[in-house]
Amino acid sequence: MASREIGEQKTLARRCESPINGQHKRNSRPAIIFVASQTDVFLGIASLVSVLKQRGHAVDVMPLEYSALSQRISRAAGPVLLGISLSIRYVPQALALLKKLKKRHRFISILGGAQPSAAPEIIEEDGVDAVCLGEGEGAIVELAEALAENRSYERVQNLWVKTESGTICKNRVRPPIADLDGLPFPDRELWAKSPFFNPNPMPMMASRGCMFACRYCQQSYYNNVLYAEYPTRVRRRSVENVIQEIKEYRQRVRLRYVRFEDSVFISSLEWTKEFCQAYQKHIGLPFACNIRPELLTRDCATWLARAGCRWISMGIETAHPRLREKILGRRMTTEQIISAARIIRSSGMRLRATNIIGMQREGLDRDRQTLLLNQRCGVELAQAFPLSILPATDLARCNKKRSVRRPFFQRLRVRNLRALFGIAVEWPALEPLLRVAVLLPLTFLYDIIWLLWEVYCQNVRLWPITPGDVERKCVRFMRRCTEWRGIR
């Protein structure tokens, strides 16, 4: 009992020294912790880590696990800043974790990413102290400096801040970063320390923003609301800057391929041509990128193929013109999709396509047409997902009064079709069986089939693995399955 009382007294003492109460020593650097996957580098957080390190701050990246985070916070001598970048999928787990941690520790929590940027009202939840809207490099540095100097951070631009009285300070959003070359390269070293880390493929971003604003995509919120007063939608790094980052990373790891995660890699044909020439000369590794069908020309495909592009990802989404243009806001024709697929394959590259299913309640017929279009395009990795209406998008604003809850059998059909879609595209002979298969309560079996198919495509077709990679990939897979499952 005595040891328990001593432990409680120590915990209470740590709380009293909290930066919230303004009792930490002046100019004491905060302990900055980001919650992120340990298996894959998340470029948004990696960029924040780099700008913080540039200013002399110590940063950790840890998984979403209560015990590990609790121990790390307990060891901190000064203020603690805990940052979580959120997609809509992980909101419940993150909020539950923060509530549990707040019962034992004092720290500043800040949420960022797509979900908090579009729905900053999440700051009203217990355990959330601040929310970052849009790009966070400038805001996170100002916040860290304010904590280090024991100053108020309630007026930091891009932040919504909850005060001790419970009121919310809603600060304006600063302009998007125009000079991306001025940013330090994303810091991948914290991930490289993990035994679950694999440097291949190397995730890269050569630009920020998107010239399009599909109604279901978060980018429509950025273009039309958050950054509406700034006309430049796409900001690109110089070719030299991109090549230099790859060169530096290549010196530290055994790099075999690169994955560009830009929304539309070929949004500027002039930049694409210059990049392909430089990449072929100085790097020469296989890479993958994302395109829009209506932007791809035969010359552009030739540049990409010569530079080493092995895979191209393209959004087909749906075969129905009205759904594609009116509902999704993707103003392209079916002929443009088919033409782009033909150009990709004739240039010697492989095609991965994303699709949206379950948008209408007419049954399987509309989704079957999308499946047939994928077959016609010769897609080698077809992925299908139900439509997710993200907050603050154009589609969300139009569907505020509509219920998105589907009947049980429709939900079953959509989930099963998601798992079997790629298999049916690969083997057209199986397509007639889908009408019955998607209605069977075999979702668990279908998910296993889908997982095996994805693993095969990603690790044999997309990026061929060596025998030495197999064990590491199995360990990484098991880690990923448990990493975000909940609070432990």
Image (spheres, rainbow, N blue to C red):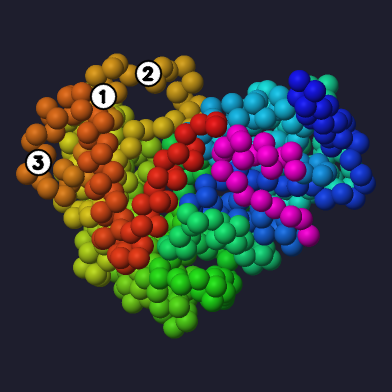
Locate residue 131: give its quadrant.
top right
Residue at (28% x, 26% y) in the render:
360
In the rendered image, residue 246, in percent from the top left (x then y), is placed at 52, 72
- Residue that sits furthest to the bottom in the current view: 281
Q: Amino acid at mark 2?
A: Arg
Mark before the other along the chain sequence, 3 or 1:
1
Q: Amino acid at mark 1?
A: Leu
Locate residue 190: give its quadrant.
bottom right
Q: Which residue occupies the foreground of this view, 417 or 102?
A: 102
Task: Name the residue carrying label 1.
Answer: 412
Residue 129 in magenta?
no
Left or right: 325 in relation to 75: left
Task: Name the residue carrying label 3.
Answer: 430
* Vertical side of 409 occupied by 243: above or below: below
Q: Residues within 10 Å of mark 2 (few under 14, many from 20)?
A: few
Task: Name the residue carrying label 2.
Answer: 405
- Residue that sits furthest to the front in the current view: 2
Gap in angstroms between the C-alphas marked 2 and 3: 30 Å
In the rendered image, residue 455, in percent from the top left (x then y), is placed at 29, 51
Residue at (34% x, 33% y) in the render:
386
